[in-house]
Amino acid sequence: MTAPHSPDRDSVAELLAACAERDRAALRRLFEMEGPSLLALARRIVRRADVAEEVVQDAFVQIWRRASSFDPARGTGRGWVYAVVRNRALSHLRDERHVPVEDLELQSYADAQTDVDDAFARLSAESALRRCLARLDAKPRTSVLLAHVAGLSHGEIAERLGAPLGTVKTWIRRSLIALKECMT
């Protein structure tokens, strides 16, 4: 005996086909059938109920927009829907990652809006953050400091350094990963 809400293989695929035809009732039915399980999946990944709800909502918008890209020859409808939610949750985690500034000395400079060029120089020689920042190349280090001390956006940093936006984003992402590894 199956549970009343457990969809069979074809029902989710049929609902996705109806969503591709812009049938709002099909999207509603899909949410009613799978919403609680998808919310539980998102909650396990992001570990926060409020964020999980946001992830599922974003995923259903994506499901609505991309339902026509579902190919039953490549897998089940249920698997496709769960993959969309999983990918949205993982994307959210990637977007939210950051390296917390724990060095009180650097934080005080950020609060006082001290010039970025001075922030690095004023770190004590024994500071773990200074040691880790010193390992970075000059432009990536400056990018990180401009972002986290001066509070500039990636676009503002790109403009200030005369570098492509994608390059600045890569510098910052890779530098933060390197700093996190160095600080642990």
Image (cartoon, rainbow, N blue to C red):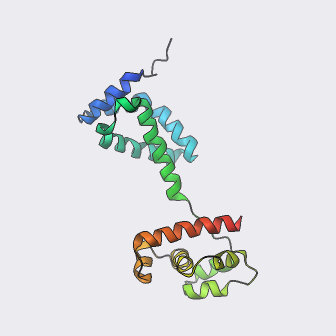
Quarter-of-image position of residue 157: bottom left
Query: Which residue appears at 52% of the width and 56% of the height?
Result: 94
Residue 171 vs residue 125, the one in the foreground: 171
Query: Do we see residue 25 in this rendering?
Result: no
Q: Is residue 94 above or below residue 165?
A: above
Count of picture labels: 0
Query: Which residue appears at 52% of the width and 70% of the height?
Result: 172
**What residue occupies the far front of the structure in this picture?**
73
Q: Is residue 122 above or below residue 57?
A: below
| Quadrant showing the C terminus | bottom right
Quarter-of-image position of residue 116: bottom right
Q: Is residue 33 above or below residue 2?
A: below
Query: Do we see residue 127 in this rendering?
Result: yes
Query: Which residue appears at 48% of the width and 32% of the height?
Result: 36
Quarter-of-image position of residue 124: bottom right
**What residue occupies the far top of the structure in this picture?**
1
Residue 14 vs residue 110, the one in the foreground: 14
Q: Is residue 30 left or right of residue 145?
A: left
Q: Is residue 28 left or right of residue 144?
A: left
**What residue occupies the far left of the structure in this picture?**
21
Task: Measuring from the top left, give residue 183's x and y in whole percent.
Answer: 70, 68
Task: Measuring from the top left, give residue 28's x and y in whole percent.
Answer: 34, 32
Task: Measuring from the top left, give residue 31's x and y in whole percent.
Answer: 39, 33
Task: Measuring from the top left, give residue 136's x and y in whole percent.
Answer: 61, 76
Residue 57 vs residue 154, the one in the foreground: 154
